[in-house]
Image (cartoon, rainbow, N blue to C red):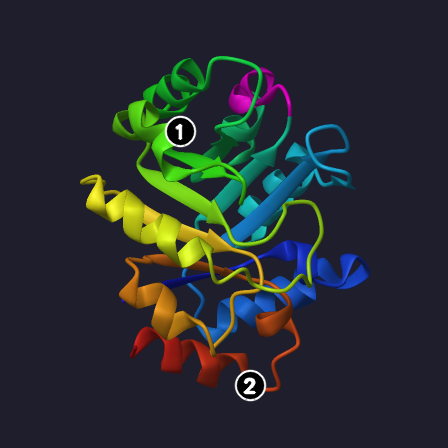
Amino acid sequence: MIKIAPSILAADPLNMERDVRRMAQAGCDMIHVDVMDAHFVPNLSYGPALVEALHSRFDLPLDVHLMMDNPEQYIDVFAKAGAWGITIHAEIPGNAAEALRHIRALGLSAGLSVKPGTPAEAIRDLLPYAGMVLVMTVEPGFGGQKFQPAMLDKLRALRQMGYTGLLEADGGVSLGNLPDLKAAGLDVAVMGTAMYRSADPAADIRAIHQL
């Protein structure tokens, strides 16, 4: 069953609790928290204080995606704030393997994300450290972009390498492309605009769970 992780990047920032509660009541499986530093990606968003606030109000796992040049400096902070899992990028200048080991040592889900331009082969040596691989299906930084179908090949390639952990996709994911994503090996769908702007997110989540 595909798990649904609505991304708070698509929520109304002035009504964050209301929008996340709507997703929780609709039956989502986790909440995806986008953290951007305005260096690794050309946007700035959220920090550990929001993760702590979400953790205090909701029982859902918080899937924290650090789109940052130096995520290793913030792993402990986000872990303490209540993250269920922390995802870093393979493209960071630091030691990604060491950062993933640190996340796992804290008892959290260790995620590894790749931008569209990074081939699956480039992360082969990092796969043993990752409990989840997040394939960006758009360029990270902004919501509402169009899904890149070529990323389906990357999901397939990771499975063909023998990767058995969770595969997650983020960027332009919708009811229309989820069957193809599932066929390619997807386990977790990060959905922003498609979920928060849905007239009936509960019906959509039920349909996705039944794929």
Q: Which mark is residue 122?
A: 1
Front residue of this view, candidates 49 and 181: 181
112 horizontally vs 31: left or right = left
| Residue 69: quarter of image | top right
Q: Is residue 209 visible?
A: yes
Residue indicated by mark 2: 200
Q: Is residue 129 magenta?
A: no
Residue stretch rendered in magenta on the structure: 69-76
On-image quarter of the N terminus: bottom left
Residue 72 located within the stretch drawn in magenta: yes
* Image side of residue 177 versus residue 197, left or right: left
Occupied quadrant, residue 103: top left
Question: Mark 2 or mark 1: which comes first in sequence?
Answer: 1
Could you tell me which residue is drawn at 69 percent across and 63 percent down? 144
Q: Element at badge 2? A: loop
Residue 128 placement (x, y as % from top left): 25, 27
On the image, the x and y values in percent for residue 193 come to 64, 68
Q: Is residue 15 above or below residue 106?
A: below
